[in-house]
Image (spheres, grey):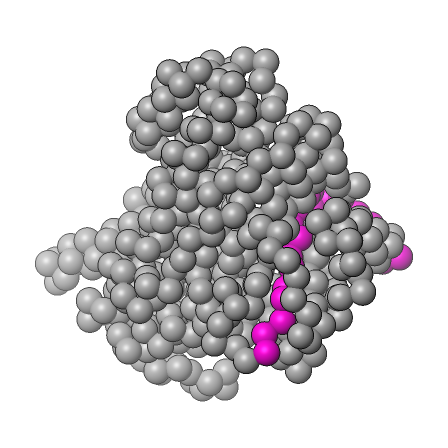
């Protein structure tokens, strides 16, 4: 059932899930479908986590926050763990562009075309390209490798910053990877995309989440939104439920889809873990955040097809640190053509979203006046960048606004507004949480690998299976 915000919850559950990102929702759907009593709690007024959207001007404009794009593996995951209807709505984006001082390339983001571009445009020997892809395909996140992304590219493409930019820049935008991160965080994500290209959901995020909500309710998952959990309950070293609005709700297991550091240090509390585990949680580094500029075009305005995703920059070379600068020179444009993105909406408007990576501290430390000034500067620079592709765009825009890491922090509750979860070490703490505290599990963006739409959904699958095993073992001892 779908609880109203004022409804009292009066029953116990097998599983309580805190947070309705794609990991939390996917786990809830699997467990509900398998006849477990599941309660999904979401602090916001809609489901989806970072897979979200918002309306403006009496719903005339709709903006997707993170719809573009994800690997082909999302089709299989949705078909198996959600529904064929949802899976069949996933379509390929065939026009990804790179425009910067080093090169201009158009691609469908498949391995075949990437290989061709590396050979024909960048003049890399075919055997080197094949060896590179073979090396990526062999990576496993259980391997204990000290190889960094810098080492990886130095091995195959020494002194080729242009090639590194072509291979690395979209992944940096996708999950915050840097050259100093473990190579495995790049290799697995890049290999996923390189299987068949980059995909999106036809119908928009609002349409997708509504379908997922219906599927959850069909599988008897109870849902309550505007429900911010205050505490995870622990009795005699075992998880026993949560505190919501000052009231205890009992459960055999709890799955947190929130930030792993917040889960351990705030929702549970240090006193319930070993000192070594607490220290590991404290040592987890948060990943970077992002800014967005949302542009809605006037009614009836159509633009020429300039690409679905455009990675554009005026910076002369690839420098991951420069991608985080407050005075940004690089951005990604996601273009939402209504006939392709939301064909079900009559008189849909073109929407364009610009995304840039950034540092939380750069925005947090601004005065209110400085904050507003920097937002205005970001909007102006975004328009200048977009004019390179659409010279008349200023006259065609009806609404424009910007979001910063503080916006992300406000709506997602992610500490420091992180858009990409944690660095690699977060994965170990997340996966071992239930071993440290029986009955408590975590699924979310950790270790960069378990991020993005596919990574999040698949991590929900992994943790749902772990919860199933725990509940089975617990039942056998009753």
Residue 97, x across and y down, in percent: 58, 42
The one of 22 and 414 positioned closer to us in this rendering: 22
| 426 or 185: nearer the viewer | 185
- Residue 317 to residue 190: above or below: above
Number of dots carrying numbers: 0
On-image quarter of the N terminus: bottom left
Identify which residue is drawn at 36% across, 49% down.
72
Relative to 9, residue 478 above or below: above
Residue at the limit of the structure toward the right, as seen here:
369
Q: Reply above or below: 135 against 298.
A: above
The residue drawn where x is 65% and y is 66% is 302
Q: Is residue 290 visible?
A: no
Up-down relation of residue 41 to residue 438 (above or below): below
Could you tell whether 253 is left or right of 443 in the image?
A: left
Name the one closer to the observer, 322 or 344: 344
Q: Is residue 364 magenta?
A: yes
- Report the front residue among 456 and 257: 456
Q: x and y percent of residue 49 in the render?
A: 50, 62
In the rendered view of the protein, which quadrant contains the C terminus? Answer: bottom left
Quarter where residue 243 is shown: bottom left
For image coordinates 51% across by 58% down, the residue present is 67
Residue 373 in sight from this viewpoint: yes
User: In the image, 135: left or right of 305?
Assistant: left
**Extent of the magenta region:** 347-369
Where does the image place residue 99, in percent across and percent down from the top left?
65, 38
Q: Residue at x 32, y 62 (%)?
A: 87
């Amino acid at each position: 059932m779908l609880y109203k915000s004022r409804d009292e919850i009066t029953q116990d559950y097998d599983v309580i899930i805190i947070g309705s990102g794609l990991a939390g929702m996917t786990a809830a759907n699997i467990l509900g479908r398998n006849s477990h009593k599941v309660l999904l709690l979401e602090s916001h007024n809609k489901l989806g986590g970072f897979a979200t959207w918002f309306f403006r001007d009496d719903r005339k404009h709709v903006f997707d926050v993170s719809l573009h794009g994800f690997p082909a593996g999302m089709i299989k995951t949705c078909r198996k763990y959600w529904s064929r209807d949802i899976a069949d709505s996933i379509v390929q984006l065939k026009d990804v562009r790179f425009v910067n001082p080093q090169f201009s390339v158009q691609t469908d983001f498949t391995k075949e075309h990437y290989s061709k571009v590396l050979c024909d445009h960048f003049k890399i020997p075919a055997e080197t390209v094949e060896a590179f892809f073979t090396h990526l395909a062999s990576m496993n996140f259980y391997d204990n490798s000290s190889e960094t992304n810098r080492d990886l590219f130095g091995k195959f493409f020494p002194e080729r910053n242009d090639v590194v930019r072509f291979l690395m820049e979209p992944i940096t935008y996708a999950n915050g990877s840097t050259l100093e991160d473990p190579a495995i965080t790049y290799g697995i994500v890049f290999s996923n995309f390189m299987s068949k290209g980059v995909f999106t959901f036809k119908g928009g995020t609002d349409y997708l989440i509504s379908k997922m909500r219906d599927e959850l309710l069909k599988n008897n998952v109870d849902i309550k939104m505007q429900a911010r959990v205050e505490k995870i309950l622990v009795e005699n070293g075992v998880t026993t439920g949560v505190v919501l609005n000052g009231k205890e709700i009992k459960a055999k297991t709890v799955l947190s889809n929130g930030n792993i550091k917040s889960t351990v240090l705030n929702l549970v509390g240090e006193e319930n873990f070993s000192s070594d585990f607490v220290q590991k949680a404290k040592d987890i580094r948060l990943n970077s955040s992002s800014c967005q500029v949302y542009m809605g075009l006037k009614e009836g305005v159509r633009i020429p097809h300039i690409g679905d995703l455009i990675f554009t920059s005026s910076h002369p070379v690839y420098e991951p640190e420069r991608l985080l600068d407050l005075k940004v020179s690089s951005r990604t444009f996601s273009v939402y053509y209504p006939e392709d993105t939301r064909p079900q909406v009559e008189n849909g408007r073109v929407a364009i979203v610009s995304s840039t990576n950034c540092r939380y501290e750069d925005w947090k430390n601004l005065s209110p006046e400085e904050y507003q000034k920097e937002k205005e500067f970001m909007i102006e620079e975004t328009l200048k960048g977009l004019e390179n592709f659409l010279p008349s765009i200023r006259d065609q825009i009806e609404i424009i606004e910007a979001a910063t890491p503080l916006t992300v922090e406000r709506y997602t509750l992610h500490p420091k507004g992180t858009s990409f979860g944690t660095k690699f070490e977060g994965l170990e703490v997340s996966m071992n949480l239930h071993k440290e505290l029986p009955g408590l599990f975590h699924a979310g963006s950790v270790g960069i690998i378990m991020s993005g739409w596919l990574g999040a959904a698949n991590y929900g699958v992994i943790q749902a299976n772990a919860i199933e095993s725990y509940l089975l073992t617990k039942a056998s001892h009753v």
